[in-house]
Image: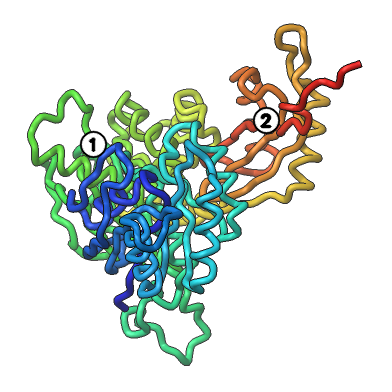
Amino acid sequence: MSFTIAIVGRPNVGKSTLFNRLVGRRVALVDDRPGVTRDRREGEGRLGDLDFTVVDTAGLEESAPESLSGRMRAQTETAIGSADAIFFMIDARAGLSPVDRSFADLVRKSGRPAVVIANKSEGRAGENGRLEAYALGLGEPVAISAEHNEGFSDLYDALRAAAPEYTAKPAEEEKIDMDDEVDVTKRPIRVAIVGRPNAGKSTLINRLIGEERLLTGPESGITRDSIAVDLEWEGRKFCLYDTAGLRRKSRVEEKLEKLSVADALNAIRFAEVVVVLIDSERAFEEQDQRIADLVEREGRALVLAVSKWDLAERKQGAISKLREQAEHKLPQIKGVPVIAVSGLTGEGLERLMQAILDAYAVWNKRASTSALNRWLEQAMSAHPPPAVSGRRLKLNYITQPKARPPSFVLFCTRADAVPDIYKRYLVNGLRETFELPGTPIRLALREKENPFEGRAKKKR
């Protein structure tokens, strides 16, 4: 179904940059100066498997109707009125402003489904601004960086949740018998298969789907584009993405390979689960660790698959040794599943698919605030926060604002003074207590507002 999305927000929050990302080319002018965009600009946008018309609009400003800014605002209001859904953008680094709150009311009154986008959220600088955006009352803010192409998988999920009437697949495309009691809203789990060149990615997918769908061979670098293949396993639908092999950046010189690598990285960003395929003959080389670390930084669920197991020398305890290597070399994703597979013989594929489902379930896990704070009390009792500059750090409470991956916000005093080693202690405690093995965990520290800050001292 064709539908229209209008991108609205204050000037210079990144609307045109997002527009260019969605249409796939630099169409709208982008500059650091506010107010570059004046007229509405339409383009054919794409996000994951969703196609739509996207409208770039002028920045919303409070102005007299007859002024240039006022006429620009009228154009934006027209775009809002004709759109089927709205992307309301804020600058996460600048935080909320009264103008944001004012125009959030305009979006709310329109009655259109809306997604709040906290742009410029790369790094930690935008976390507070994203959390502030809850106050707009338009739902859970989505943290992205339009400039650095981050967070678009979360934006895809938010759009589908906000506007299911436009984003749901047609019944004929789903190929579902309406007489069967099937949840038609259940969409396939997106799984990207990545790894070094010639690790056996295409062979593995061909074995999973039961046909020679993808070109394979002994040469490395056969796959160039990210190819999507549908799979159904034990009643659950999957969309598997075969990707080009990822070599070290210093070895990538040809333009075509650079484009292939960019396509593979994009597949990782849009995936929900990423299977990192490791050649059993050269397991856990530096590039394997780099790829796994990239997946963790992107916040995707992760499974390690050791390929070509039919060629490996079968020694007693070989799998246990591989798991020990994973724990040692990838401590940031402790407990990640390690599965031995063979795309040639089909060995281990049942275990691999079950590991993907398990990793996906952990990635979506949520913990109640009460359980989290009981855990926090016990963690602090066992190992109190250290004293910094002679003053004890105080951890007030913890909550989980989102999953995919599990993300926690810890309110405390002097957040910047909490040592990294104590943060790791807390993350490991969360992983163990709430059974979050092998998934990325995000822990943000935020200082509680001081109600007395800024008040003049009372004169005696």
- The front one of 332 and 157 is 157
Whether residue 235 appears in this view of the structure is no
Residue 113, disc: none
Give the image location of residue 223, x and y in percent.
Answer: 15, 48
Report the residue that reaches farthest toward the bottom: 179
Residue at the image point whose x is 72% and y is 25% from the top: 413
Residue at label 1? 246
- Note whether 202 is above or below 386 in the view shown: below
Q: Residues within 10 Å of mark 2 (few under 14, many from 20)?
A: some
As drawn, is 332 to the left or to the right of 395?
Answer: left
Cβ atoms at labels 2 and 1 below 8 Å apart: no
Give the image location of residue 367, x and y in percent.
Answer: 69, 49
Figure label count: 2
Residue at the image point whose x is 49% and y is 65% from the top: 107
As drawn, is 193 to the left or to the right of 340?
Answer: left
Q: Nearer the viewer, mark 2 or mark 1?
A: 2
Residue 447, disc: 2
Residue at the image point whose x is 45% and y is 52% from the top: 117
- Note whether 198 is above or below 70 in the view shown: above
Q: How is the image coloured?
A: rainbow
Q: Residues within 10 Å of mark 1 (few under 14, many from 20)?
A: many
Instruction: Name which residue type carries label 2.
Output: Glu
As drawn, is 199 to the left or to the right of 236?
Answer: left
Can you say which quadrant of the picture contains the C terminus?
A: top right
Question: Mark 2 and mark 1: span between their CA atoms?
Answer: 40 Å
Give the image location of residue 257, x and y in percent.
Answer: 12, 39
- The front one of 50 and 351 is 50
Q: Quadrant of residue 361?
A: bottom right
- The front one of 316 and 348 is 348
